[in-house]
Image (spheres, helix red, strand yellow):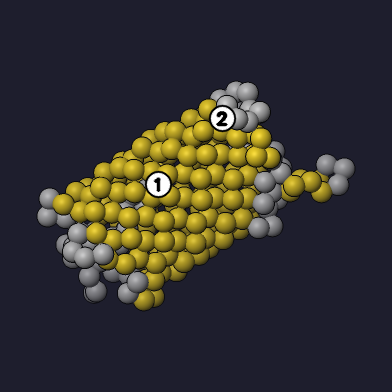
Amino acid sequence: MRRAVLVLLLGAAAAPLPAQRFVFGLAGVGGDYREATNDLRYDVSGLGGTAVLTLGRFAAEAAVMGLTYEPNQSGTAADKFEATQFDGYLRYRVLRWASLELGVTNRDVKDEFRAQSAAAFRIGVHSAAALGANGGVAARVNYLAGAKFSGGGSAPFAMDVGLSAYYAFAKGRLRITAESQFQHFNRTVDVGGTQDVPIQQVLGRLGLAVAF
């Protein structure tokens, strides 16, 4: 069996030490959310956690975030709301630095009168590279298929793009982690004709991870 490769998104990128097969991380979250138009926008904050298990060429990753959406002063949104977002991934490494990836994304809005809950399947690729003995970077691009929304509609085109980096210390057991995530749904609804009501979210995360 080839040595394991661990990746922490919501925090970490690949190429850890050989003995490490599990990584757990916590991070603070901040970002921007827009729905329908750029005028309906929110500032996002919250906390998130992630876990990654790697066995040979396979890896399973899960990330959960509790998010609060506050109306941005430059927009027209009036009320805040809260949501829980889950991102899950299964990967198979086809090259030392590249993997094929499947998964899901689900953002569950507690008050669906405020914003859209959204869910979709992920299909994409993941790439990781080491930067010396103590650091690494990773990137992923996912097409979001079969998107569903609490208020109806569809998204013929939807995508999720992620970038991450880490720096390890304490013999590689602890990591400072950083990640960005861009998610866009080109949502349309049929209300007396097709109307464009896109949804876009950009998140940044900074945290600490522990590798076992």
Q: Image check: 52 left or right of 75?
A: left
**Which residue is the extreme one toward the top?**
79
**Which residue is the extreme one toward the front?**
74
Q: Position of residue 147 (x, y in %)?
A: 63, 51
Q: Give the camera-side residue of 106 and 46.
A: 46
- Say if mark 1 contacts mark 2, CB within 8 Å: no
Residue at 56%, 60% in the rendered image: 143
Residue at 34%, 49% in the rendered image: 178
Q: Quadrant of the N terminus?
A: bottom left
Q: Image check: 196 left or right of 131?
A: right
Circle 2 SS class: loop
Residue at 43%, 50% in the rendered image: 180
User: Could you tell me the amino acid type at mark 1?
Assistant: Ala
**Which residue is the extreme one toward the bottom?**
95
Q: Alpha-carbon distance for marks 1 and 2? A: 26 Å
**Which residue is the extreme one toward the left?**
171
Local crowd size for mark 2, using a 10 Å CA cut-off: few (<14), some (14–19), many (≥20): many
Q: Is residue 81 visible?
A: no
Earlier sequence position, callout 1 versus callout 2: 1
> Mark 1 or mark 2, which is nearer to you?
2
Q: Quickly name the residue at label 1.
A: 63
Q: Is residue 12 visible?
A: yes
Q: Position of residue 137 (x, y in %)?
A: 33, 60
Q: Quickly name the residue at label 2.
A: 72
Examine the image and state in which quarter residue 126 appears: bottom left
Residue at 39%, 67% in the rendered image: 127
Examine the image and state in which quarter residue 115 appears: top right
Q: Position of residue 83 (x, y in %)?
A: 51, 34
**What mark, if any, has residue 82 been given in the picture?**
none
